[in-house]
Image: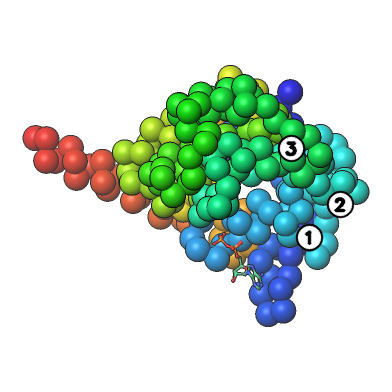
Amino acid sequence: MAASLAFEGVTKRYESTEALSGIDLAIEPGSFVALVGASGSGKSTLLKTINRLVEPTQGRVLLDGKDVAASDPTAMRRSTGYVFQRIGLFPHMSVGENIAIGPRLTGERMGEERIGELLTLVDLDPAMASRLPDALSGGQQQRVGVARALAGDPSLLLMDEPFGALDPVTRDALGVRVRELHESLDLTTIMVTHDMAEALILADRVLVMDGGRIVADETPQALANGKGGEVAQALVSVPRHQAERLKELEA
Ligand code: ADP
């Protein structure tokens, strides 16, 4: 069952910066939401308040109606899949051990069969379980990162710039696969990206952040049709100009 999320007046202050300024937001089960915005706009901080890597200074985050501050962080992180920005596999552990690490932290042993199943989900050969991460390409490593995030059967998948380090072709293929998994595994997915094209293609709902606030909350269709205001449209203009330039070259 996909999870629901709600943010109520969520503010995060660091000494001299307000990273988040009173975020109010509700996310329906089954949504694929992209958080887009310039570097430093608060995307990553907002994502991390969900799995308590960041504790809000004020306000609360509700996962399926329950305040995450009152939940057991280990159990909650296990049921909330998290794909790291820099892949973050442990280099001295095999691919299989990396995938099984979440459940292991809660005292469970994951069988070879389940590890193979998870590798298959992300289009990798189950035989890769015994390899070390170094023996895999960047794209394969991030596929393992996605398999690891799915290991606890999450209802919520959080991704922080998941494809940023990958080449464009790999990036596109993995994005499509993640969107398929979002549907087939009935997930709620929140993806941080600075790439508006990726957000428009993969998400159902695009939230644009600027200076710790959400300044646009639109569907990809609405953004493509000029809605969402100045900050959002400045981001949309990048892929739009690229598409126009390509069209000109075709002529
Ligand atoms: P984004 O993900 O959009 O690049 P972040 O959420 O990482 O933005 O950061 C938002 C703001 O909060 C930035 O100004 C950043 O410098 C600041 N910030 C984030 N984490 C910390 C921290 N641990 N200590 C101090 N300031 C931080």
**In the figure, is residue 73 to the left or right of 18?**
right
For label 2, being within 8 Å of ligand 1 is answered: no
Q: How crowded is mark 2: few (under 14 residues within 10 Å), some or many (20 or more)?
A: some
Point out residue 127 in the picture as x, y percentages from the top left corner: 48, 28
**In the figure, is residue 125 to the left or right of 208?**
left
For the view shown, which residue lies furthest in the top direction? Answer: 184
Q: Where, by quadrant of the figure, is residue 123 drawn? A: top left
Q: Are marks 1 and 2 in contact (CB under 8 Å)?
A: yes
Label 1 is placed on what type of residue? Answer: Glu
Point out residue 9 in the picture as x, y percentages from the top left corner: 79, 55
Considering only order in the chain, which callout, 3 or 2, is on the residue closer to the N terminus? 2
**Dot label at residue 103:** 3
Q: How crowded is mark 3: few (under 14 residues within 10 Å), some or many (20 or more)?
A: some
Label 2 element class: helix
Which quarter of the figure is the C terminus placed in?
top left
Label 2 is placed on what type of residue? Answer: Ala
**Residue nearest the viewer, comparing 156 with 150:** 150
Point out residue 162 in the picture as x, y percentages from the top left corner: 50, 46
Q: Which of marks 2 and 3 is in front?
A: 3
Label 1 element class: loop
For the residues labelled 2 and 3, the Cα–Cα distance comes to 21 Å
Q: According to the image, label 2 marks what residue? A: 69
